[in-house]
Image (cartoon, grey):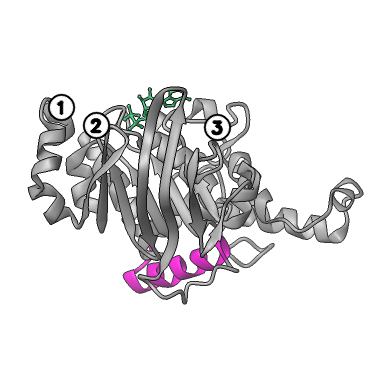
Amino acid sequence: MTDPQNGGPEVTAEGGIVAELQHMSVEERAEHDAEVAEVVAPDRDIDVEVGQTLLEVDDVTMRFGGLVALDQISFDIRRGEILGLIGPNGAGKTTCFNAMTGVYRPTSGEVRLEGKALGKASRHGITQLGIARTFQNIRLFAEMTALENVVVGTDARHKTSLLGALVRSPRHHREEKAAVEKAMALLEFVGIADRAADRAKNLPYGYQRRLEIARALATEPKLLCLDEPAAGFNPAEKEDLMGLIRTIRDDGYTVLLIEHDMKLVMGVTDRIVVLEFGKKIAEGVPAEIRENPAVIAAYLGVPDDDVA
Ligand SMILES: Nc1ncnc2c1ncn2[C@@H]1O[C@H](COP(=O)(O)OP(=O)(O)OP(=O)(O)O)[C@@H](O)[C@H]1O
């Protein structure tokens, strides 16, 4: 099944591409996945040195009036890893995320991406620099289709001027076409291409979560930040999502994952930073964190569902 327009697989909301994938051999599927990755992020430099420091949180303090939500927090995120940021409710995880993504400016301290301080960059500016995020509470354009939601995400990488867009210059036209192709490839990558034409509000909850991830990936981020992406999922859905997050990492992205389901975090992350009452109480590989007495104490009294 081939789309005569672009020579690629036919992309239909009726699941044409899904049916086609089911009939591919392992080799064909690998080749196809490589092509999808190329469409998804043609400009992404995947020859980065895995393990280099990508982002530094350096002595960050965040106060809200008298409350110290983050108290002199420092940690690094390395290229190509999945870093888990965990801690009991109210530990400061979301505040840390917000300080890294331009929602809050730290009261003191600094966040640096590739050595450059984020400083006063706006949220949009931070997306342009290469940090994308999803939210604990899903924030999609409810009336737009899944495909449109992802096309919007690609805007961060468009080069056409406003005037070019208004007069619909050839460059704008080309970018628009490329954006739709890329968005479709991303929907496929996260496993929801069969519902591309459905409005976001009509998608099942699990699809909405994946759609948020596709939209974040559309900005071609150097760092993808996921805020409790498995919230509200049953165990099987959580397992599926962790598989997707691993695939994203294997595809060359760096991922920061906030999650308070310990089991989930242990199974998917390369390293973990643990917060409690705004302080960093531990940092290490999952096996170390699991045995860490301060972490065990911090999680005492947390419902079994979150710890088991
Ligand atoms: N905008 C704000 N104004 C005042 N206090 C805030 C604000 N945002 C967060 N806080 C407080 O900062 C502390 C850390 O909250 P935060 O949401 O970062 O924790 P969390 O680890 O993400 O928790 P959860 O797992 O429940 O989402 C809490 O005491 C919270 O009430």
Q: CA distance from mark 2 to mark 3?
A: 27 Å
Give 159 or 196, whichever is nearer the viewer: 159
Mark nearer the N terminus (2 vs 3): 2
Side of 301 where 116 appears, left or right: right
Q: Which label belongs to residue 280?
A: none
Q: Which x, y percent locates residue 303?
A: 14, 25
Residue type (three-letter) at the residue carrying disc 3: Leu
Give 246 or 13, whichever is nearer the viewer: 246
Q: Which residue is mark 1?
A: 302
Q: Which residue is mark 3?
A: 140
Q: Is residue 18 visible?
A: no
Check mark 1 vs ligand 1: CB closer than 8 Å? yes or no: no
Mark nearer the N terminus (3 vs 1): 3
Secondary structure at badge 1 equals loop
Secondary structure at badge 3 equals loop
Q: Which x, y percent locates residue 218?
A: 57, 52
**Proximity of marks 2 and 3: CB atoms separated by less than 8 Å:** no
Check mark 2 vs ligand 1: CB closer than 8 Å? yes or no: yes
Residue type (three-letter) at the residue carrying disc 1: Val
Q: Which residue is mark 2?
A: 88
